DNA sequence: TAATTATTTTAGAACCATTCCAAAACGGAG
DNA sequence: CTCCGTTTTGGAATGGTTCTAAAATAATTA
């Protein structure tokens, strides 16, 4: 665990919970001016392998990194792009009962409207 | 419905069911030598909007296009990359019961081992 | 501590699927 | 046949991520 790696982990842990690499880079650079995007990627990978954080891949746009590595699902607000946590139960288990194929893992992203954007929309 | 658009639809319909743009391009070019990748993309978009086919987005690599536009889920073989159809029921409905957030849509890709690769693995 | 080796960091190039652009080609309506 | 809107085309641009090889840093050994 190097200094910069710790800094990147800190940035994510002190965040709302889900950040994209470019935003992590932006925030980490404030703490360590000599920070570079490649280093951010390197360390995000390392932290994932160490099980300290979790990568959340999306079909459109950049991936997110989740400070909470325990399994859960994610929703993205279609208005502001915010990522939210979801608890949908043991889908792996559930899917397994519905097919004969071996289910190794899955990528799931739900599209939603976050409470803030939902409220703003109601006002208008 | 132009000639080339029909050709692209035909390629997909005569396929195993799920193809990626580059493969559609390769096959369509055999029918129409003057075919260009941009045209494939244009027409895939148009066919999607017309509801004749369906785009299946993935977090890693190229999107797939599905000749069956009715809603169902998809699995990808981690060995050979083949896309398979899954029937997992009305997940939209199901997810809605498990959260207060409005669920607009979702992207789901299950990672599996297709029967063929599974068999080959058993042999070895 | 010095020397050696392994790991990180860095800058920038490379990658790849997709989109964008503006010009040329096409196709149907009149 | 002509005109106008749509399609097609080639190529450049985009954007996130990965790769590469060299420099810097850290860890290990003597």
Image: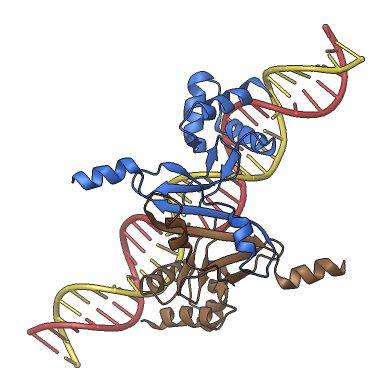
Chain colours: A brown, B blue, C yellow, D red
Quarter of the picture containing the N terminus of chain A is: bottom left
In this rendering, is residue B96 above or below A34? Answer: above
Q: Is residue B44 left or right of residue B122?
A: right
Q: Quadrant of the C terminus of chain A?
A: bottom right
Q: Residue at x 26, y 43 (%)?
A: B119
Vertical placement of residue B76 versus C11, above or below: above
In the rendered image, which quarter is residue B71 located in?
A: top right
Q: Residue at x 55, y 21 (%)?
A: B34
- The total of numbered circles placed on residues is 0
- The structure residue drawn at horizontal position 31% and vertical position 40%, both measured from the top left corner, is B116
Image position of B47 with respect to B119: above or below = above
Q: Is residue B32 above or below residue C16?
A: above
Front position in the image: B47 or A99: A99
Measuring from the top left, give residue D22's x and y in whole percent. 32, 64
Whether residue B102 sits left or right of residue B60 in the image: it is right
- Whether residue A48 is visible here, answered yes or no, is yes
Q: Position of residue D24 (x, y in %)?
A: 35, 77
Q: Is residue B84 left or right of residue A86?
A: left
Q: Residue furthest front?
A: A97
Q: Quadrant of residue A97?
A: bottom left
């Amino acid at each position: 665990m190097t200094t910069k790696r710790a800094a990147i982990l800190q940035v994510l842990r002190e965040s709302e919970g889900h950040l994209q690499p470019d935003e992590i880079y932006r925030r980490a650079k404030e703490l360590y001016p000599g920070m570079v995007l490649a280093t951010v990627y390197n360390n995000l990978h390392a932290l994932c392998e160490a099980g300290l954080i979790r990568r959340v891949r999306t079909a459109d746009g950049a991936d997110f990194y989740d400070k909470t590595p325990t399994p859960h699902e994610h929703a993205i607000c279609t208005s502001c792009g915010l990522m939210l946590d979801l608890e949908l139960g043991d889908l792996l288990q559930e899917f397994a009962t519905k097919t004969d194929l071996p289910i190794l893992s899955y990528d799931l992203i739900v599209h939603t409207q976050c409470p803030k954007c939902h409220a703003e929309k109601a006002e208008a």
